[in-house]
Amino acid sequence: MEFVILIIISYLLGSIPFGYLIAKYNKVDIQKVGSGNIGAANVTRALGAKWGALTLILDVVKGFAAISLVNLLFIEPKVGYYILAGSFAIVGHFKSVWLNFKGGKVVATSLGVLLGLTPDWFIIVILLVFVITILLAKKFGSPKIASQKVALGSMIAAISAVIVKIIFGGGFNQDNFEITLFIIGITIMILIAHRENIKKII
């Protein structure tokens, strides 16, 4: 019974379309503005940095909340329980039941999930990669690439997460095997969600 509750609540947490709701509060249909995405980057373009930052924080929190839910439901949770909760939170954001199974590009929610699963240093490294990529794309990239700098930063940060985890985070040893596979899965989903951005950058 606990597994069913975990799956349902994790999915529903992930599916809360904060970007859409924040834009709706400001009388804007975010799905008809800019890229049409409900994530923080598009909300920032449409409504400004304040609302974009709020969207980012809330999307991160819902991923972290799904991981925290495991500790409330299980006395001695296994790693697989956290991965299950994180997976459904991410899927919920990607395919929200409240938006006819449309959603965002899962970066912020994935960050929240990883925040609950991995050490602080891991998150700091990934955020640094994201920021450095954006700065380099803005300074040295072509105008088209620079205009896609957030997407580019997100994708490179996701790929870096796999590399950092394998080299510095235990990789595929017995204690880290499941989480490493999970991070690889998250990276693949982020790349799939950004497939249109990849075409534009190319």
Image (spheres, helix red, strand yellow):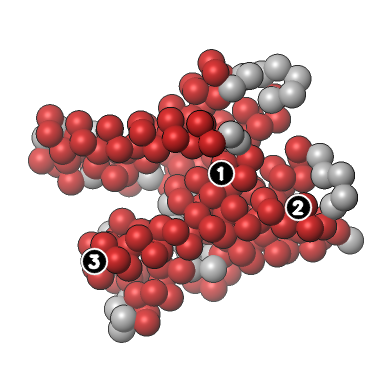
Q: Is residue 134 above or below residue 39?
A: above
- Point out residue 197 in the picture as x, y percentages from the top left corner: 30, 44
- Point out residue 156 in the picture as x, y percentages from the top left corner: 37, 32
Where disc 1 sits, the SS reads helix
Three-letter residue code for mark 3: Gly
Q: Which mark is residue 56?
A: none
Q: Which mark is residue 48?
A: 3
Where disc 3 sits, the SS reads loop
Residue at left offset 29%, top offset 66%: 50
- Residue with the mark numbered 2: 70
- Residue with the mark numbered 1: 115
Q: Is residue 103 above or below residue 27?
A: above
Where disc 2 sits, the SS reads helix
Apparent side of residue 180 relative to residue 197 in the rendered image (left or right): right
Mark 3 Cα shell of 10 Å, populated few (<14), some (14-19), many (≥20): few
- Point out residue 31 in the picture as x, y percentages from the top left corner: 34, 69
